[in-house]
Structure formats: C-alpha cells, structure tokens
Amino acid sequence: MNIGACVDLQGWLVIESHKLFLIPEAYSENYEDGERYEISRPEIIFAVAELVLPLGGGKSFIFHRSKLSGVVVGDSPIKIDPVFLSVEERGRGYISIDVAAASLDKYRERYQAFFEKGRSGNSNDWLDYL
C-alpha cells in the first residue's frame, strides 16, 4: 500500500500495546505477530467502547469485526487515517463510529491516561488498568 492511497478493509478491530489495529478476518493464532493495520487515532478506542460491549478480560477489551475506509498515512507499520469505521456489535449488526477529529477531542485525555497506565504496568489483562 502506498502512502496517500485510499483503502477499504474488513477484519477485526483489536487493541495491541495500547494502540488500535485492524487485523485480517483470517488471523493467525498469534494475531499480534501477523499482518495488521494501525489506526492513526488511537483515541477512537473510547468512541468504540461507548457503543459496543467490551470483552470480559484478556489483552483487549475490543475484539470486534469491523469495516474501515481511510487513507494510508504510514508504512512501517501500515497506518490508516480513518474516514469511515463501523464495528459489529453482538445482536445489533454494524454500528457506525464517528471518527471526525472534532468528535474525538473528548477522548484524548482518557486515551492518554489509558496509555500511561499501560506503560507502567505489566499485566496482560485490560481490567487491571481501569
């Protein structure tokens, strides 16, 4: 993928190392080492969390099927600036997430606190960072 290219992707939205990624639908058992696309604005984690039920523990409280459209803004790893994002919620189908920069401002401080807690901890369970 070239920087500046517009892409439409489907896969699983997941948090890895306190960043948001889309991994392919058919991911390997160790999905953290496989193919993945980083979402350029990690504060989207909390926009998603307001609309879907979190998982009950583990490495990521988001592990949901997603559809993503955006622009490639980085290549190592491939980083996508989202224009459209939808997330599948159990029993409700796909829900659109507002990814406009202005609507994400309210999540920046919350994300920064989440990131700082994660850097200072050594747990593999997201519940430990609440």
Image (cartoon, rainbow, N blue to C red):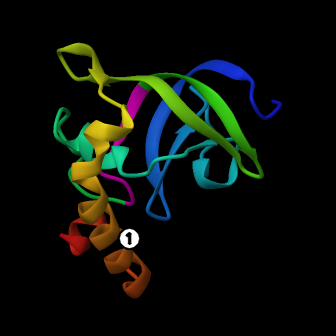
Instruction: Point out residue 80 in the picture as x, y percentages from the top left corner.
Output: 61, 37
Instruction: Point out residue 100 in the picture as x, y percentages from the top left corner.
Output: 36, 31
The residue that mark 1 highlights is: 115
Residue 16, above or below 52:
below
| Residue 116 sits inside the magenta stretch | no
Residue 62, above or below 57:
above
The residue nearer to you, when weighing 33 against 116, is: 116
Give the residue type at disc 1.
Answer: Phe
Left or right: 5 in relation to 97: right
Instruction: Point out residue 119 in the picture as x, y percentages from the top left corner.
Output: 43, 80
The residue nearer to you, when weighing 28 against 103, is: 103
Which quadrant holds residue 18?
A: bottom left
Residue at the extreme top? 93
Residue at the extreme bottom? 120
Residue at the extreme right? 2
Q: Residues within 10 Å of mark 1 (few under 14, many from 20)?
A: some
Secondary structure at numbered mark 1: helix
Residue at image point 24% right, 73% down: 129
Residue at image point 28% right, 49% down: 105
Quarter of the picture containing the N terminus is top right
Instruction: Point out residue 55 in the picture as x, y percentages from the top left corner.
Output: 24, 46
| Residue 60 sits inside the magenta stretch | yes
Which quadrant holds residue 65?
A: top left
The residue nearer to you, when weighing 6 against 33, is: 6
Q: Which residues are magenta?
A: 59-65
Residue at image point 68% right, 20% down: 6
Left or right: 80 in relation to 99: right
Quarter of the picture containing the C terminus is bottom left
Which quadrant holds residue 9?
A: top right
